[in-house]
Image (tube, helix red, strand yellow):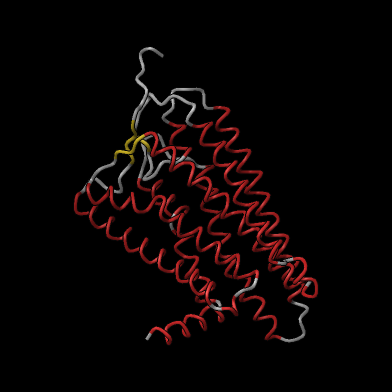
Amino acid sequence: MSNYTTATEFLLMGFSDIRELQILYSFLLFLIYSAGLMGNLLIVIITTFDRRLHTPMYFFLRNLSMLDACYLSITVPQAFFNSLVNNRIISVTGCAAQVFLVMFMVYVELTLLTVMARDRYVAICHPLHYPVIMSPRVCLQMTITCLLTGLVYAAFHTGYTFRLSFCHSNVVHQFFCDIPSLLRISCSDTFSNNLSLIVSDVVVGAGCYAFIIASYVCIFSTVLKFPVKEDQKKAFSTCIPHITVVSLFIISGTYVYFHPPSDSGSLKDIILSVFYTVIPPFLNPIIYSLRNKQIKGAIRILMKRTL
């Protein structure tokens, strides 16, 4: 080990080495970030000030939107700034902070989507008991549990990753710091790291996804028994957006973590990570606002008041 030099900073991968394309990618990332941030903040504002939306469903939607606004802010601003000024350097401390925040956001988003599935299950399958089962106190407790366990999850994986030595290379083959890319450039034994990452991803990811699927099996079986077609349509309209978000998030995230970036890095790896870290929080407000009549109605009222 005396022949190695431990990295004191990392170099992130860029979207292109061509200056014109760097500026173009920076502009596109800025547009995506601005639209995603404004969309999520709009949902937060609407669900906060419109008293008709003070229900458990919109309480969790508001939390998801705040989470997505933060999630976008972790990786995208630095990515478009780095692309704009052609500077790929990130400190080890900054890299560790990014890993911690990304892992925290991923965990909380997944568990929060799972809680939202339970909310829909109780609302549709047990409507008479809904006010008791999903009381404001219970909703707050579930949200706090997601946050606290997320802190533990992120702290463990971040600490376990940065105990390693990084001396093979300081080039992270991603546009942000993520664990699979860091493990590839470590000169330490990473078997236990890879194993713990896979086990935790399977337990948390598969566990949450199984719960969500089971919830929607029960939901759809109940909805199909509704005698009125309009009630069926209304129930499906609140469930389909949630399924869309969950599927995009879990499928893209699973692909990234079970098919880590190549040793040399490629634009394909970066694009796949964009679908995992950028597209879901960007699409959330679009999906929920376009498929939800109450959200669209609240937006119209807000626009009339401001104009």
Q: Position of residue 219 (x, y in %)?
A: 73, 69
**In the image shown, does 4 or 301 lie closer to the viewer?**
301
Q: Position of residue 6 (x, y in %)?
A: 37, 23
Residue lying at the far top in this picture: please name it: 2
Residue lying at the far left in this picture: please name it: 19
Q: Quick check: 52 above or below 12?
A: below
Q: Quick check: 216 above or below 200?
A: below
Image-based side of 76 in relation to 253, left or right:
left
Q: Quick check: 279 above or below 48?
A: above
Q: Is residue 16 visible?
A: yes
Q: Is residue 275 visible?
A: no
Q: Position of residue 217 (x, y in %)?
A: 73, 65
For the point 41% across and 26% down, which residue is it?
166
For the point 44% across and 32% down, which residue is it?
184
Where residue 143 sits, quadrant-wise, is bottom right
Q: Quick check: 186 above or below 226?
A: above
**In the image shown, does 135 or 260 lie closer to the viewer?**
135
Look at the image and tell me in which quarter the N terminus lies.
top left
For the point 65% across and 75% down, which residue is it?
236
For the point 58% across and 28% down, which residue is it?
192
Look at the image and tell me in which quarter the C terminus lies.
bottom left
Where residue 264 sits, quadrant-wise, is top left
Image-based side of 135 in relation to 101, left or right:
right
What is the tally of numbered marks visible in this picture?
A: 0
Q: Position of residue 291 (x, y in %)?
A: 54, 76
